[in-house]
Image (cartoon, rainbow, N blue to C red):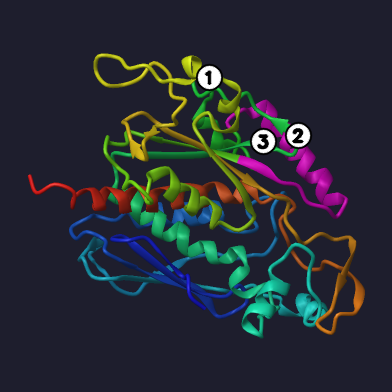
Amino acid sequence: MAGNSFGNIFKLTTFGESHGLGIGGVIDGCPSGVKIDLKMIQNDLNRRKPGQSKIVTQRKEDDEFIILSGLVNNITTGSPIGFYVKNKDQRSKDYNHISNTYRPSHADFVYEKKYGIRDFKGGGRSSARETISRVFGGAIAKQVLNKIKFTAYVSSVGNISIENDLKKLNFSNIEKNPVRCPDIKIAKEMEDYIKSIKKEGDTVGGIISCVIENVPVGLGQPVFDKLHAELGKAMLSINAVKGFEIGSGFDGTKLKGSDHNDQFKKDGSTYTNNSGGIQGGISNGMDIVFNVAFKPVSTIMKSQKTIDSNGNEVLMEGRGRHDPCVVPRAVPIVEAMAALVILDYYLLNKTVKLK
């Protein structure tokens, strides 16, 4: 299986399965001499881990990491950073009923057809538990890029949405509620809705918005490696993601060019930010803003029509512990993937000019 590495200079390679011994990875290309705060890494892992509230899966994992290499006295040496997180609360028996059955909208069918074999226990590599490694790598990248700020938050769940006006939102509220929404009132509505969906044995999707502040001008590699294209790839590689839009996104199609154009100020900044901080595939110094759409989790506790490996039509029902809505736990994953892209392109930019 190829495709387990992400990045060019700052490169993350991940390994492990949901119900295997653990999840881990190797970070190559991290600059030396960077002081790493291990508590900041654990904090991001805690924001992603299961069992943190009543609206997420109740699988109980500490998600405590072990660093195998690459740091001396918590300072990066420039050598590969190896890390590992042990799995503790697997319940593989919850998946015995699908050993020969394909879950609708899951990766079961395509994995078996592609590789001739699949790990049905928790989905193997298709499980979102793999994102532990992404969050770890992103936590390192954030600390290398200590002047750049990454803030992701839930802006909608189902049909419940906030007024996504960055001038009015209070980001300090994001971690004060289990949904990770900056609007406390709307967050409670979202939370209650997720709980009701869970009681029905169903799931619901949502949107995570992200703002990257203090990005320098010049990040991006035209023509095929535009910065927004790489961010799109990063976000679409996250489990359950079905859409990515940057700046004005699809709403921009409703505007005239005279309304959409970001006119310049004397200092090079712009009065508006419909470009989302990227023009011509290169960062322009304005905040990078984008949205990521997550579908409803595929595993539901209701009977559904499917087929088994012999092509027989059967009925199946989900079992075990699953998220009724993935977006609250996906907030640190979005931040992490954004940080991996920005650091990689920051390092690439160092190769553009000799002087």
Between marks 1 and 2, how big is the CA–CA gap?
Answer: 21 Å
**Residue placed under numbered mark 2 in the picture:** 159
Question: Magenta part of the protein: which range?
Answer: 182-207
Q: Main secondary structure of the magenta part?
A: helix
User: Disc count in the image?
Assistant: 3
User: Quick check: can you spot residue 287?
Assistant: yes
Between marks 2 and 3, how big is the CA–CA gap?
Answer: 7 Å
| Callout 1 touching callout 2 (CB < 8 Å) | no
> Residue 248's x, y, as percent?
53, 28
Of 130 and 354, which appears nearest the observer? Answer: 354
| Callout 2 touching callout 3 (CB < 8 Å) | yes
**Residue placed under numbered mark 3 in the picture:** 156
Instruction: Relative to 204, say whether 164 is above or below.
Output: above
> Residue 78's x, y, as percent?
21, 65
User: Quick check: can you spot residue 179?
Assistant: no
Choose top left, top right, bottom left or bottom right for residue 109: bottom right
Task: Decide which of tag 1 and tag 2 comes sooner along the chain.
Answer: 2
Between marks 1 and 3, how big is the CA–CA gap?
Answer: 16 Å
Q: Of the residues shown, which amino acid type is indicated by label 2? A: Asn
Q: Of the residues shown, which amino acid type is indicated by label 1? A: Lys
Task: Decide which of tag 1 and tag 3 comes sooner along the chain.
Answer: 3
> Residue 212's x, y, as percent?
41, 37
Specify whether 164 is left or right of 272. Answer: right
**Residue placed under numbered mark 1 in the picture:** 168
Label 3 environment density (alpha carbons within 10 Å; few <14, some 14–19, many ≥20): many
| Callout 1 touching callout 3 (CB < 8 Å) | no
Q: Residue at x 46, y 57 (%)?
A: 135
Is residue 194 on the magenta stretch?
yes
Q: Residue at x 32, y 31 (%)?
A: 284
Which mark lies nearer to you, 1 or 3?
A: 3
Which mark lies nearer to you, 1 or 2?
A: 2
